Image: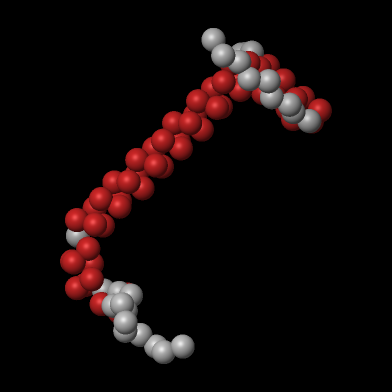
Amino acid sequence: MPALNVEFSDRELEDLRQIAKERGTSMKALVREAAAADIARHRALQEGAEAFRRFFQAHADEFAAAFPDDEPPARGEGRAA
């Protein structure tokens, strides 16, 4: 299995030791669990953002009609520089 060496400050390392001890787990398991949770969170945020983009694109005309003041000016329109 691939491995990764990670450097921590003395304070961070002591905090990790304490947390691992409190949870009754190893530091390696604690760090792996934290990384896995962050990966899962990142994926969920990406999936949520993509679902929102699809929804917004599918309903763009409805949003434009409901919120006309929020629509950007069409190309060639708008204020002159």
In the image, farthest residue toward the bottom: 80
Q: Residue at x 44, y 31 (%)?
A: 40
Q: Residue at x 73, y 26 (%)?
A: 7
- Residue 28 at what x, y percent from top left? 63, 16
* Residue 30 in picture, x, y percent from top left: 60, 20
- Measuring 35% from the left and 40% from the top, which residue is drawn there? 47
Question: Compared to 8, does 64 lie above or below?
Answer: below
- Residue furthest toward the top? 1
The tally of labels here is 0
Q: Residue furthest right?
A: 10
Q: Nearer the viewer, residue 75 or 34?
A: 75
Residue 6: x and y, percent?
69, 24
In-image side of 53 versus 41 (left or right): left
How are the colours assigned in the image?
A: secondary structure
Left or right of 30 on screen, residue 12: right
Write down the quadrant of residue 9 in the picture: top right
Q: Can the viewer see residue 80?
A: yes
Residue 50 sits above or below residue 17 on the image: below
Confirm whether residue 22 shows in the render: no
Question: Where residue 13 sits in the image (x, y, percent)?
Answer: 75, 25
Q: To which quarter of the image does residue 15 belong?
A: top right
Residue 28 in the figure: left or right of residue 61 = right
- Can you say whether 78 is above or below 7 in the image? below
* Residue nearer the viewer, 58 or 9: 58
Look at the image and tell me in which quarter the N terminus lies: top right
Front one among 71 and 23: 71
Which quadrant would residue 18 be assigned to in this image?
top right
State whether residue 80 is above or below residue 1.
Answer: below
